[in-house]
Image (tube, grey):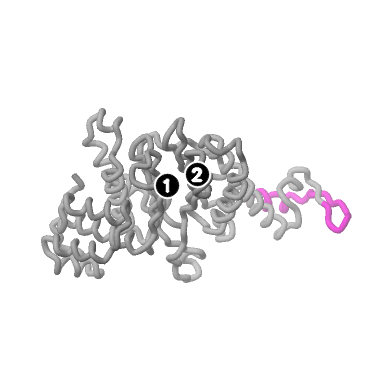
Amino acid sequence: MATVFFMKFNRDQGAIIADEMTWHLSFKYGYRPSRYGDNIMNLLDAETSMKNDFVAVYAGIGFPSFHFEVARKAAKKLNMDGETIGNLDKTGEFVENIYQEVHARLINDRLRFNFGFDRDQLNNRKFKYEGKEYDINQESVIDEAKKILNFGDKQEAYQRIFDNEGLVMGYDKDNGIRAYHIENSGRGLEFAYPFDAMGPGKELGTRVFADTSYRMQLEERRKGFSFSDGLFLLLNCFIESYDSNMKTGGYFQIFMIDGKREFFNELTKERNDHNCHLAAEIIRGYRWGYLTRSIAQPLIDRLVIQGEDWEPIENEMFEASSDPGLLKKYLMGFKPANVPNKPLK
C-alpha cells in the first residue's frame, strides 16, 4: 500500500516521502508484508530535466505493479514528447491518460478472464470468439460484468485494480512547484494547502502540520518555508504517522525538488539509504524530548540535504542527547513510556 507525504516548502522547493511497506495479499491470507518497494519514481532523465528546467515525479499507493507500469510507460513516452516537457499541467494530463489506460487494461483482463469479452464489447452487447459473433443478452452475466466495472466485488483481485491513487508532483519555470492527484475517477490539482498525504496514517501526519500552520501568521504562510524548515516539518509529520500506523514500515524514500538549485547541482535529489533511517531516529529523539531542535535540524540537513556519512552523525546525536542511554534503549524498540516529550516548535 505505502504512505506518501508531500509538501511544497515555497514556490520553487518541495519534497515527497514514501515508506517501503506493501501488503500484497493483505491480512486475509496470512502473508507478511514486504519492505522493499520504491514508491517514488522520477519520470525524466537528468539531462532532459536540466535542459528544460523541469521536474516531473510520480508516486503511488496501492498495488506496486500498477504504479510501476504507469511510471514506466509515462517515462518512456514523456522523454520523447517535446510538447509536454516543460508544462506540468500537460504532464499531469499526460500521466493521467496513461493511468486510465492501465486501469482499463486491468479491468479488461478481468472481464476477458471471467466472461471472454472486454468493456467495449460489453457496451456493444456483442463479442467475437474464434471468428463467430455472439450477443451478450443474459442479464445475470451483464450484472456480474457491471459489478466488476463499478467495484461492486471487493475481493483482493479487484482491490488491486481500484484501490490505487497516483500523484504527479513537479516543477516548471512558469508556476514553480505543483502537484496533481490521480484516481480512476479523474485528476485534481493539489496544494490548496502546502501539505498533503495519501495512504494509511494520513490523518496523523496532517494533524502535526495543521498544528504548526495554525500558529503561523498570514505573511509567514504566504512566504512559505525555507528548505531546511520545510524538510524538518515534513519529516516530523511523516514520523508521527509512521510510528502510529501499523501499515507503514521499512526504510523510506525522500525525493527533494530544488528549483532554485540552492543545494544541488541537479533539480532533484533522492535519498533512500541509511541516512534516511538515521534521520528518522533523530526526529524521534527530538519528538521524545532528548534532542533540541537546534541540534536535530542541522543533523537532518547534513544527512538528507548534504548527504554526509551517517556514522559520525549518529555519534554526534548520542553525544548531544540529554539522556543517551534512554534514547538508545527506545530506538532499539523498547516502548518510550516515560519520555520528556514536547510539541513541535
Mark 1: few/some/many CA within 10 Å (<14, 14-19, 20+): some
Q: First in sequence, mark 1 or 2: give its number.
A: 2
Asked which quadrant contains residue 112, the reply is: bottom right
* Residue sitting at x 78%, y 46%: 125
Q: Residue 341: image x %, image y %?
A: 16, 55
Mark 1 touching mark 2, by CB under 8 A?
A: yes
Q: Secondary structure at mark 2?
A: helix
As helix, strand or loop, the secondary structure at mark 1 comes to loop
Disc 1 residue type?
Answer: Glu
Residue 49 numbered tag = 2
Q: Confirm whether the magenta stretch covers residue 137.
A: yes
Q: Which residue is mark 1?
A: 266
Q: Using a 10 Å C-alpha cutoff, classify the residue at mark 2 as few (fewer than 14 neighbours), some (14 to 19) or many (20 or more).
A: many
Quarter of the view holding residue 304? bottom left
Residue 343, percent across and down? 18, 48
Name the spot of residue 323 as percent of width and height, x first: 12, 64
Using residue 92 as the reference point, say whether residue 284 is left or right of it: left
Between residues 180 and 57, which one lies in front from this camera angle? 57
In the current view of this chain or complex, which residue is farthest to the left?
322
Q: CA separation, marks 1 and 2?
A: 9 Å
Query: Is 215 left, or right, of 277 in this rendering?
Result: left
Report the amino acid beneath label 2: Ser
Instruction: Decide if residue 277 is in sight here.
Output: yes
Tell me which corner region of the image, top left, top right, bottom left or bottom right, holds residue 250: bottom left
**Residue numbers of the magenta segment:** 128-147
